[in-house]
Image (spheres, grey):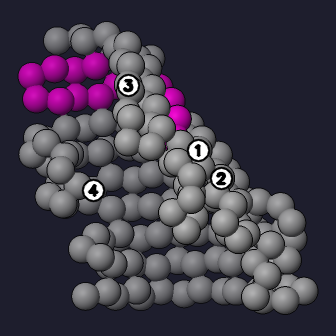
């Protein structure tokens, strides 16, 4: 079941609404979202669309006791071209044990905090290969039995189904 409750404002013009890249204007929303088995207690979103260019997106999300911010660009769908994104933000108070089981996260009580930058592309219509690079800088965080000092780094690279990662962190206890 899905439930989206909130306020939204759409102020978009276009040469033709069937041509997504011709759209320009703003979209904003403040909502509680329950969708596909996931729940966001609050989502604050603002997107600015510029005809022919990527959308500028700014968002704040509060879910499962954690908060996250996101700011950057997302290309608008245009035929078979992949959607490209370049987003920076912060995630705070992430408790893996509180996340929905469907995500497959460990059932562990954590307090994870980090700044992140994610860049990539998602193919449309099944054409092409998903690409994603995530760089994160950890702030002080805890996992069962250990505390991580701030400043550690992590990187995740995804190309299609191939996944590679690197972590460099200092464990305090």
Residue that mark 4 sits on: 65
Residue highlighted by disc 3: 165
Based on the displayed image, in which of its 4 quarters is residue 149 positioned? Answer: top left
Q: Is mark 1 on a helix, strand or loop?
A: strand
- Label 2 crowd (10 A; few <14 / some 14-19 / many >=20): some
Residue 167 in the image: x percent, y percent? 36, 18
Element type at marker 4?
A: loop
Say above or below: 46 vs 161: below
Magenta stretch: dominant SS? strand
Q: Disc 1 vs disc 2: Cβ atoms closer than 8 Å?
A: yes
**Above or below: residue 65 compared with residue 33:** above
Give the number of the mark in front: 4 or 3.
Answer: 3
| Nearer to us in this view, 69 or 84 | 84
The verdict on residue 136 being magenta is yes
> Residue 62 in the image: x percent, y percent?
39, 61
Kindly report which numbered mark, 2 or 4, lies closer to the viewer in this rendering. 2
Cα gap from disc 3 to disc 1, whole angstroms: 15 Å
Tell me the magenta residue range: 132-148
Q: Where is residue 173 in the image (x, y as percent from the top left)?
A: 17, 12
Sequence-earlier tag: 1 or 2: 2
């Amino acid at each position: 079941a899905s439930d989206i409750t909130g306020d939204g404002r759409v102020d978009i013009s276009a040469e033709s609404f069937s041509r997504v890249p011709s759209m320009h204007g703003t979209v904003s929303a403040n909502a509680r979202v329950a969708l596909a088995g996931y729940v966001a207690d609050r989502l604050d979103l603002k997107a600015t669309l510029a005809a022919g260019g990527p959308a500028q997106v700014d968002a704040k999300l509060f879910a499962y006791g954690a908060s996250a911010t996101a700011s950057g660009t997302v290309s608008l769908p245009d035929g078979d071209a992949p959607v490209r994104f370049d987003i920076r933000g912060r995630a705070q108070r992430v408790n893996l044990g509180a996340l929905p089981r469907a995500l497959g996260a460990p059932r562990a009580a954590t307090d994870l905090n980090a700044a992140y930058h994610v860049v990539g592309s998602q193919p449309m219509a099944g054409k092409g290969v998903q690409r994603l690079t995530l760089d994160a800088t950890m702030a002080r965080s805890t996992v069962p039995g250990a505390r991580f000092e701030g400043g550690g780094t992590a990187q995740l690279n995804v190309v299609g189904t191939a996944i590679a990662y690197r972590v460099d962190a200092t464990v305090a206890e």
